[in-house]
Image (spheres, rainbow, N blue to C red):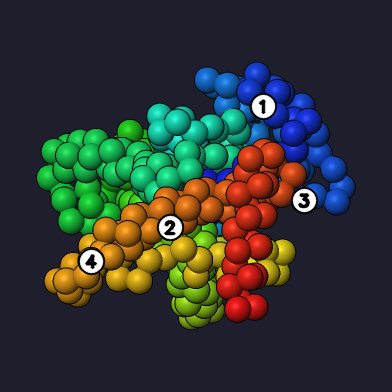
């Protein structure tokens, strides 16, 4: 399962030119960073593909388990080594295409994308979409869209070839039982496993749980109304609830993978919340509550009230809305690259906004 989907890039300036060139300079593993324990396996369209060492171990363990489970026809896992290898191959390519969907969407919207890492919980694409809600929503949505397109191929092919639609062409995401009537044909089993993999990836990633794609889409959709920071905070809170729900489901179904995904989601939510708290402490105010005009620019109550100063207030509200948008963009950049990534102009805007808010608080 592609947990995490895509992640904002957070590279140092020293690596920026190497990334733009599609280089692998920053892929060297370090002992203090488990996420760097990976090896480069390919580079496509200046996007480096890395294979985490734990992913290799995961493949070996699954094949080892399949070898023993194949002799136990009464057990839950009875695919056998061959079908399991096909399933893992479908998983790898489906997740990889899913992550390329994120990367290409980020670039199409004016952003950047430079690498994909495959690991036991799926894939992580390093994307930096343009600083607006639409680019972020499109980047998050295009991963699941790839899985949907693959399903658009496997369902009619399998349904037409077998005459079995529900349960086979449209498989159950909770069971691989639909493979039983197809065991006489390797190509039908491969199409079935490809469809099942993409259905699971699609449904799983659309859960409104941060940092899954559904959680990122939720944050992007809330962004225009709440602002970037407040929308991110709301998505993180939803992520806590969803992470706990996945944790309970993993315990009930005795699924180790679900437990790992839940743990990953909860830890990521906590890290993002701590980053927001750090930003709030650094600025001296809550960025999510700054520069939001009461009632918005089109408040019907305000427009219906005759007021000779309505034009001045409208201009002031529009100015504050523009400042809010610019401040959101700067806060997004801080979240992705830290304070060191800001330009002199952005530092000045942030400093003026901070001082203005502090003066208002003192007043």
Q: Residues within 10 Å of mark 1 (few under 14, many from 20)?
A: many
Instruction: Name the residue tied to disc 2.
Output: 320
Query: Can residue 281 be seen in this snapshot?
Result: yes
Q: Earlier in the sequence, mark 4 or mark 3?
A: 3
Instruction: Name the residue located 23 percent from the left edge and 57 percent from the top edge.
Output: 167
Instruction: Name the residue located 60 percent from the left edge and 78 percent from the top edge.
Output: 363
Q: Earlier in the sequence, mark 1 or mark 2?
A: 1
Instruction: Name the residue located 85 percent from the left edge and 43 percent from the top edge.
Output: 30
Q: Residues within 10 Å of mark 3 (few under 14, many from 20)?
A: few
Q: Earlier in the sequence, mark 4 or mark 2?
A: 4
3 vs 2, front mark:
2
Q: Position of residue 268 (x, y in %)?
A: 61, 63
Q: Nearer the viewer, residue 307 or 161?
A: 307
Mark 3 vs 2: CB contact within 8 A: no
Q: Earlier in the sequence, mark 4 or mark 1?
A: 1
1 vs 2, front mark:
2
Query: Can residue 123 be seen in this snapshot?
Result: no
Question: Secondary structure beneath disc 1?
Answer: helix
Which disc, if any, is residue 308?
4
Instruction: Name the residue tied to disc 3.
Output: 34
Separation (CA) of disc 1 from disc 3: 20 Å
Which disc, if any, is residue 19?
1
Separation (CA) of disc 4 from disc 2: 20 Å
């Amino acid at each position: 399962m592609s947990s995490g989907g895509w992640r904002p890039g957070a590279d140092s300036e020293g690596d920026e030119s190497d990334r733009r060139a599609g280089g692998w300079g920053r892929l060297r593993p370090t002992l203090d960073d488990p996420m760097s324990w990976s090896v480069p396996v390919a580079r496509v369209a200046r996007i480096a593909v890395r294979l985490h060492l734990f992913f290799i171990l995961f493949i070996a363990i699954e094949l080892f388990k399949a070898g023993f489970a194949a002799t136990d026809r009464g057990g839950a896992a009875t695919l056998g080594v061959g079908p399991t290898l096909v399933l893992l191959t479908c998983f790898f390519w489906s997740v990889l295409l899913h992550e390329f969907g994120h990367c290409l969407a980020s670039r199409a919207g004016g952003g950047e994308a430079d690498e994909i890492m495959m690991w036991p919980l799926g894939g992580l694409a390093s994307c930096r979409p343009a600083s607006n809600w639409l680019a972020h929503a499109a980047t998050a949505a295009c991963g699941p869209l790839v899985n949907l397109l693959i399903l658009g191929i496997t369902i009619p092919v399998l349904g037409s070839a077998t005459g079995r639609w529900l349960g086979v062409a449209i498989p159950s995401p909770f069971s691989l039982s639909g493979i039983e009537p197809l065991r006489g044909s390797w190509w039908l089993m491969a199409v079935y496993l490809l469809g099942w993999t993409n259905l699971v990836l699609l449904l799983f990633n659309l859960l409104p749980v941060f940092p899954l794609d559904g959680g990122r889409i939720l944050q992007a959709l809330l962004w225009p109304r709440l602002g970037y920071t407040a929308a991110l905070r709301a998505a993180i809170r939803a992520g806590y609830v969803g992470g706990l729900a996945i944790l309970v489901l993993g315990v009930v179904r005795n699924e180790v993978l679900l437990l790992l995904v839940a743990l990953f989601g909860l830890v990521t939510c906590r890290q993002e919340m701590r980053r927001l708290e750090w930003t709030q402490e650094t600025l001296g105010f809550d960025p999510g509550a700054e520069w939001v005009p009461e009632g918005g620019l089109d408040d019907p109550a305000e427009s219906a009230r005759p007021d000779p100063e309505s034009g001045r207030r409208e201009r002031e509200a529009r100015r504050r809305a523009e400042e809010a948008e610019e401040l959101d963009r700067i806060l997004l950049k801080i979240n992705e690259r830290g304070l060191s990534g800001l330009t002199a102009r952005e530092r000045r805007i942030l400093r003026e906004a901070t001082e203005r808010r502090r003066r208002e608080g003192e007043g």
